[in-house]
Amino acid sequence: MPTTTLRTLNGLDDKPAVLGAATLVLVDYQNTYTRGVMELTGWREALDAAAALLARARSAGATVIHVINDGGPGTPYDVRAEIGQIHPDVAPAEGERVVVKQAPDAFVGTDLGALVDAAGHQDVVIAGFMTHMCVAFTTAGAFLRGNRPTVVADACATRPLRSGAAELTAAQIHRGALATVGDLYGVVVESAADLG
């Protein structure tokens, strides 16, 4: 049986963001995660959900910010090469900013905070790759700087990993990361349809 969340204990609400009154932050939807050594479980379904979320955000007039990770030349995260570029299904439209990061928390060492502040919304909607890494850390970063994050679960994906002697499935890691977010750092919704 679930226990009381830290959000509840701290008097934080569980009301999801309203897309038209929020900033959408799309994290690391790079080709990196669609093939090869970093291919994620369920990336296609998550990318389809992200494309639908992006279309809704654009229709609602939301500010959209794309984030990509640059691991440097020759890496799977080389933003100068096709492998490190944003997947065409969620490619930035004219006027949508792209933030290049080098840490799991996209607010660290970037102008993301300034862009979010300039958009004028406390609420941020976050989705991306990987759930347990850059999505979780960027959500925590948003919360710690005073934003109200909402994470869209079906637009996120991750991969199976080992934890000590245990082999964890991608679904276990995905749900564990979302539970961490939902315990304190933000509201978790299953899909864009659940946004206010």
Image: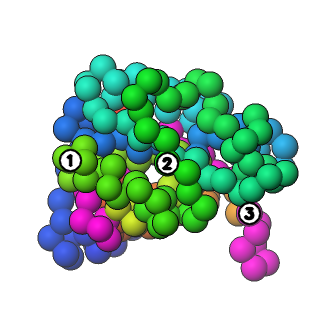
Q: Secondary structure at mark 3?
A: strand
Is residue 50 depicted above or below 67 in this figure? above
- Of badges 2 and 3, the one in the foreground is 2
Is residue 17 depicted above or below 161 in this figure? above
Mark 3 and mark 1: span between their CA atoms?
Answer: 35 Å
The amino acid type found where label 3 is placed reads: Leu
| Dot 3 crowding, Cα within 10 Å, few <14, some 14–19, many 20+ | few
**Residue at screen point 21% across, 69% down:** 8
Q: Is residue 89 left or right of residue 63?
A: right
The amino acid type found where label 2 is placed reads: Val
Q: Are marks 1 and 2 in contact (CB under 8 Å)?
A: no
Span shown in magenta: 143-167
Residue ID for mark 1: 121
- Name the foreground residue: 91 vs 19: 91
The x, y position of residue 93, in whole percent, is 46, 24
**Residue at screen point 21% across, 76% down:** 9
